[in-house]
Image (spheres, grey):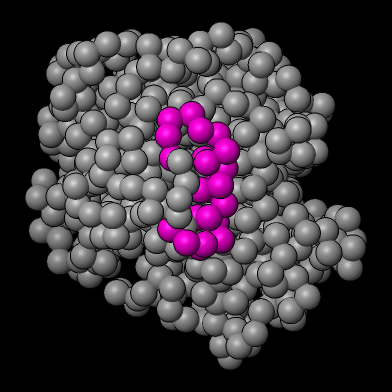
Amino acid sequence: MANGYVGKIALVDLSTEKIETIPLEDSICSDFIGGYGLGAKLLYDLQKPGTDALSPESILGFMTGPLTGTPAVTGSRFAVLGKSPLTGTWSDSNCGGYFGPALKMAGYDGIFVRGAARAPVYILAADGKIDIVDAGEIWGKNTSDAEQIIKKQLGDKTQVASIGIAGEKQVLIANIINDEGRAAGRSGFGAVMGSKKLKAVVAKGERDVPLADPHKMQELRKEAIRDMKKDDGLFEAFQNGSGAYTPMGIATGDAPTKNWSGSGWDDFPQGSDWTDKDVYKYRVKKYACYRCPIACGGLVKMESKKYGVLETHQPEYETMAVFSSNCLNDNIESLIKIDNLCNNYGVDTISAGSLVAYVIQCFEEGLITKEDIDGLEMTWGNHEAIVAMTEKIATREGIGDILAGGFQSAIEHLGTRTEPYAMHVRGEALPMHDPRFEPALGLIYKINASPAKHLPASQFFKPPGLDLDIPDFGTDIEKQVERARSIRVLECLNNAMSSAGLCVRGYLSFDVRFLAAFLEAATGKNWTVEGLVEAGERIANMRQAFNVREGVNLIDEKFPRLALGKPPLERGPLAGSSVDIDSMLEAYLEEMDWDKESGRPSRRKLNELGLQNIADDLGSQ
């Protein structure tokens, strides 16, 4: 095996300390590409159905794609994947930075971990070898300190994906951090690492990633960067950084306001004079992931009387929106503090901010008292209380111990009357893009195998060069249904892109045909856009098969009525908007050829995709 792939995946059993190698065959790579696509097939085969996500028998995967660590533009991504302890579904969390390329250069396409260590450890992949290393010195440290200690021991070129105290304490919204601020944020995989006493996965190596045509890859890189700068895509917008979108997101109603019960500046007037300059007033340096020409990130330095001196990564849009408009908080210094706190403790910001907004609304509505929430004055915009509650969740202190179990735990403790204000699907908090602004997002949040994620279909924009008619945004039923039908192709291409190891921001900035060309230069296989759609559809069905085998039926899952405009808002940019999720769901299931009651892929579809064994396993008709 060569050409885009190292050719092996490590299977590490922390209980027995046994390390095996899973060789990769050309056929499985062609069928599932890499990343979470290949990971879905391997996990389905390796893990027994019904396995508890926090048990030693569960398997957690760290997977790269064939373009990870190559000159392909934005080829920096890796995926963490497995069964989510938060939702009980298949899940994957995508991440940039430098860890993914380092893992490939260390001699592995991926690492799968099962079992649980007797004492804290980390896994070291270096120069084609895996070691299980004592982590007693860094257990109890935050992610930044742990990373710095490991780099001091092993060298600055070492890359570290670690959990913080939240993961160690198995907070169900705990994430995994690399490069001190790049997060595999959703799904609670930090808690899975904590349950295994796995503090970090560490990669060190300088091996070249094998390519079928290195010269062609370099030429394609130059061409793609020139294409990005034509501004047919979103290159310039992404260069500004996602945080710059926050004021526009609030103004249009895309960013939820007041825990989804308000809309725009009408309900968040205290922030109505924000501009991107306010958002970035503390930025001192741009930040780019591995070989990325976009450089959408940034580093900030803040000297605050309230929150001290901080030098850290700047908050991204999702973090800013969930802790600003969604909590009616206009204190930007508190947003930087919260972002740094969440990165260090290892906590998903979308989930934490959504839980905080839920608590605020329940308190403001008189459904809970200060005694229920450790005496905190959880009122709209009280940034000090918002910071304090976030830290409680991250450390499982007081009421934070309840909230650390996610929305379902919170509702059980605080009462079912609080449920209408819990904005989640099966425990996963909704992202900061409102379906009342773009209705098809509601469908993606509900039915995607990894629920409540906003990127699976890149629904807002199609990549440049894609020949696909997509109706303009609109809330009338006909437009909603047509956009729902278009999700199949968009989702399948997105699966192919993510599984290849590219970032969605590159994918939406250059002609989609570059994705096929990059893959061909890397692997030597002839790829086309149509072939990418087919591979992406195979991945979608593989992920869905995992959920069906687990007894998960997202069709029947509750969806927050507020996010569907039931009842519609009476003012603001989303006034009168509502989402016909039932009609969209029917159209999508028909397009995917999945059963409309169970979500089970049809035998015809699975056979068409070469998944006959999966059809037999699921008993598909």
Which stretch appears magenta?
A: 378-399
Type of secondary structure dominating the magenta stretch: helix
In which quadrant is the C terminus drawn? bottom left
Name which residue lies at 60% across and 84% down.
Answer: 117
Residue 9 figure quarter: bottom right
Q: Count the marks: how many?
A: 0
Mark yes or no: residue 119 visible: yes
Q: Where is residue 281 in the image (x, y as percent from the top left)?
A: 73, 19
Mark yes or no: residue 444 visible: no
Name which residue lies at 29% across and 27% down.
Answer: 261
Q: Position of residue 307 (x, y in %)?
A: 71, 38
Drawn side of residue 370 relative to residue 79, left or right: left
Q: Position of residue 161 (x, y in %)?
A: 67, 59
Front residue (pair 598, 329): 329
Residue 412 drawn in magenta: no
Front residue (pair 225, 277): 277
Residue 346 figure quarter: bottom right
Front residue (pair 50, 362): 362
Task: Classify 415 as above or below 124.
Answer: above
Task: Classify 70 as above or below 477.
Answer: below
Name which residue lies at 58% across and 13% down.
Answer: 274
Name which residue lies at 70% across and 21% down.
Answer: 280
Residue 319 figure quarter: top right
Q: Where is residue 310 in the image (x, y as percent from the top left)?
A: 78, 39
Task: Classify 113 as above or below 30.
Answer: below
